[in-house]
Each structure stands twice: as structure tokens, then as C-alpha cells.
Amino acid sequence: QMQLVESGGGVVQPGRSLRLSCAASGFTFNSYGMHWVRQAPGKGLEWVAVIWNDGSKKYYADSVKGRFTISRDNSKNMLYLQMNSLRAEDTAVYYCGRDPCGGDCFWFDYWGQGTLVTVSS
Amino acid sequence: SYELTQPPSVSVSPGQTARITCSGDALPKKYAYWYQQKSGQAPVLVIYEDSKRPSGIPERFSGSSSGTMATLTISGAQVGDETDYYCYSTDSSGNHRGVFGGGTKLTVL
């Protein structure tokens, strides 16, 4: 059974860093691209980043480019999101999602349950 | 930056047909996807590539796209369908960005 489980969320001060993780199981992880999508409290969904199945390509939303880094470890079936210089507006539930292709389908067929990041002093 | 526009809310009576629209300049060239999100839960894919329905999604959910508008249709809407729906697509400029619509709250009462 396919499963995506996010972790690493919590409360962090503005300007600090946090790394989110997404553990994948039930499918051949290295065959699929992976995305991060976030949702601020009471707001809509926002696409954040994508990484190709082999890690060769990465793309980011303008709102996080230069501050966030998406990465993966195919030997561990893990996806990561390193978030630096965090701002109050980064407060959101962060979801990982599977791309049904290597990355270039650019949509998501399965999602994890999300992890909450709160940026506050 | 590219935007997808959805109505904030749509209301229907049980058993009626609900239509949720999504407009975007790139939709003639790019597929639309639809996600259902119930309160406190992760989104669920209900329509992909404009009109395809994933396994397990009821037949009352259908999708279409014409010109710059994509439409999610729920035929015979049920009280359990009352929740938020988001369209998603990408722009056609080749800059590799995903974009969601602002979401539509469907009320069935």
C-alpha cells in the first residue's frame, strides 16, 4: 500500500531553518518525481517545489526560490525540504506529493497527510 | 505570474448538478487537474488530464475543458460532496511552475 509520511514540522523563529522529511513506501520511489505543496492556515494550496526521480532537475515557486532546497535520497526512499531564512508567511501545512511520472508530468496523484510548520517569535 | 481563477463558492441542492469552473490563459495548451479537500485532510485527486477519473472516484465526478476554462461537474451532488475543490495546472511559458486555483467551497443543502 502506497504511503507518504511527512515529519519535521514544528515552531521555529523567523530567520531560522528547518528540514522537513517525507518517507515513501509501497512504490518504487526512484521511478517517480516528488513535489512539496503547502497550505497556510485557512488558505488555499500553493505548489512549492518539484524534484525529478533521479534528482537531476529541481524547480521552485518564486516565493521560496533561493531559501528552500528540495532533495531526495533514493537509497532511503526519502524526500526532503530544507527551509532557510524562514518568514512568518511560510507558516503552513506542508504536504509531499508523488508525481505520476519521473517529474515531468508536474502533477500529483498521491499526497501525504502533511506536517505543520509555524514560524513565530 | 500565471493564475487560475475559481469562484469562491458554489451552492446546489442535493441531487442537483454542481459545476465548478477554473479559468486560465494556458488551459488550451495545458491539462487541468481537480483535487477535493475535506477539512483537516490531505487533498484527493478526483480528475486528471481534464477529464479522466482515477479508480475509486465515483462516476458522478466528471471533468471537461474548452478554451480557457476547465469545469468540474458533480452530477447528483450529495451532502458528502460538500467541501473544498481546487483546480491545478501549469503555465505554458516553460518556466516549470505549478499553479492552484484559489479553491471553491461547494455547499450542498
Image (cartoon, rainbow, N blue to C red):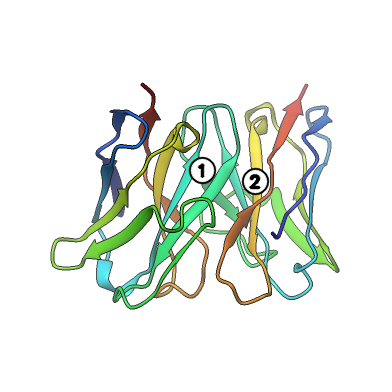
Residue B96 x, y percent position in the rendering: 55, 70
Residue at horizontal 83 percent and vertical 41 percent from the top: B17
List the residue tagged with mark 1: B43
Residue A24: mark: none
For residue A57, above or below residue B8: below
* Alpha carbons under labels 2 and 1: distance apart: 9 Å
Label 2 Cα crowd, 10 Å radius (few <14 / some 14-19 / many 20+): many
Q: Secondary structure at mark 1?
A: loop
Task: Assign a secondary structure to mark 2.
Answer: strand
Q: Nearer the viewer, residue B56 or A69?
A: A69
Q: Are marks 2 and 1 in contact (CB under 8 Å)?
A: yes
Give residue B72's position: percent from left, percent from top. 74, 51
Disc 1 residue type? Pro
Q: Sequence-wise, which precedes: disc 2 or disc 1?
A: 1
Q: Is residue A54 left or right of residue B85?
A: left
Q: Residue at x 76, y 67 (%)?
A: B27
Tell me if residue A119 can be seen.
Answer: yes
What amino acid does circle 2 point to? Tyr
For mark 2, what is the residue?
B86
Residue at coordinates 41% horizontally, 58% vertically from top-left? A66
